[in-house]
């Protein structure tokens, strides 16, 4: 029973055998009430959290709070890889449009194609809704760039403005510590200084 609990914790990203063992022994020796609360919260989440019918993020309701918010513009659609990307963008407070979550990126070698990312749903959304701008916010990885390129090509048939989030040197970052790809992105994505 203890070993199966260890293995269950190892299913979490970044949790190895020793960390899982520390979690298990902490809950069993020092915080059994916390263990029961964790178990209940996990069961509740597994039973009630699903994907939003519109944007595909995680939600307890049929449509998430962002999709049902009438103060958000539906003419802008930001394409992200994961629900955590939405959380990061929302913390900035700079975006007031809606989202579409891919839940991954194109990776034919791993068997992840357009259908697995819901790109057929995205294409249908573009056909039926008045989207004026697609903001590609996939990660700055090879897979993220390939996915952004695929979506860009798909969107061109709808005459929709396609933009890409900027990549480059972060605020507070120093050039000497940035890698060459980050510097190259920063230079190619430069804009006029006012």
Image: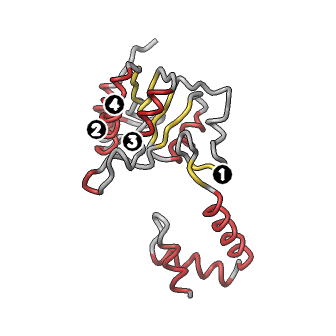
> What SS does tag 3 mark?
loop
Q: Please rate how many residues cluster around mark 2, counting C-alpha atoms within 10 Å: few if below 14, some from 14 to 19, many from 20.
A: few
Mark-to-mark CA distance, 1 and 3:
26 Å
The mark closer to the camera, 2 or 1, is 1
What is the distance, in whole Å, between disc 2 and disc 1 at their CAs? 39 Å
Q: Which numbered disc covers residue 154?
A: 4
- On the image, the x and y values in percent for residue 98 come to 56, 32
**Circle 1/circle 4 CB separation < 8 Å:** no
Pointer 4 or 2: first along the chain? 4
Distance from the alpha carbon under mark 2 to that under mark 3: 13 Å
> Mark number for residue 15?
none
Which residue is found at the position 52% from the left and 80% from the top?
A: 6
What separation in Å lies between label 4 and label 3 (alpha carbons)? 18 Å
Residue denoted by label 1? 60
For the point 59% across and 27% down, which residue is it?
96
Give the residue number, with chain letter if any, for mark 3: 139
Q: Judging from the image, what secondary structure is the residue with disc 2 in?
A: helix
- Dot 4 falls on a residue whose secondary structure is helix
* Residue visible at 44% across and 44% down in the picture: 102
Q: Residue at x 59, y 37 (%)?
A: 90
Task: Choose top left, top right, bottom left or bottom right for residue 41.
Answer: bottom right
In this rendering, position of residue 38 left or right of residue 16:
right
Q: Position of residue 150 (x, y in %)?
A: 31, 36
Where's the N terminus, which quadrant?
Answer: bottom right
Residue wearing tag 2: 181
Residue 189 in percent (x, y) is at 35, 25
Q: Position of residue 168 (x, y in %)?
A: 38, 33
SS at badge 1? loop
First in sequence, mark 1 or 3: give its number.
1
């Amino acid at each position: 029973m203890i070993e199966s609990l260890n293995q269950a914790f190892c299913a979490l990203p970044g949790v190895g055998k020793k960390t899982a063992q520390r979690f298990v022994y902490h809950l069993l020796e020092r915080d059994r009430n916390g263990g029961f609360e964790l178990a209940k919260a996990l069961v509740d989440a597994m039973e009630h959290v699903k994907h939003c019918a519109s944007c595909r993020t995680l939600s307890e309701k049929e449509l998430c709070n962002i999709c049902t918010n009438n103060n958000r513009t539906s003419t802008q659609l930001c394409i992200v890889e994961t629900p955590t990307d939405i959380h990061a963008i929302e913390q900035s407070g700079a975006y007031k449009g809606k989202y579409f979550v891919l839940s991954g990126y194109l990776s034919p070698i791993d068997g992840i194609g357009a259908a697995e990312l819901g790109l057929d749903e995205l294409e249908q959304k573009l056909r039926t809704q008045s989207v004026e701008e697609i903001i590609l916010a996939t990660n700055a990885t090879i897979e993220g760039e390939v996915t952004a390129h695929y979506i860009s090509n798909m969107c061109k048939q709808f005459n929709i403005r396609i933009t890409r989030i900027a990549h480059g040197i972060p605020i507070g970052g120093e050039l000497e510590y940035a890698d060459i790809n980050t510097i190259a992105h920063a230079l190619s994505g430069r804009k006029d200084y006012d």
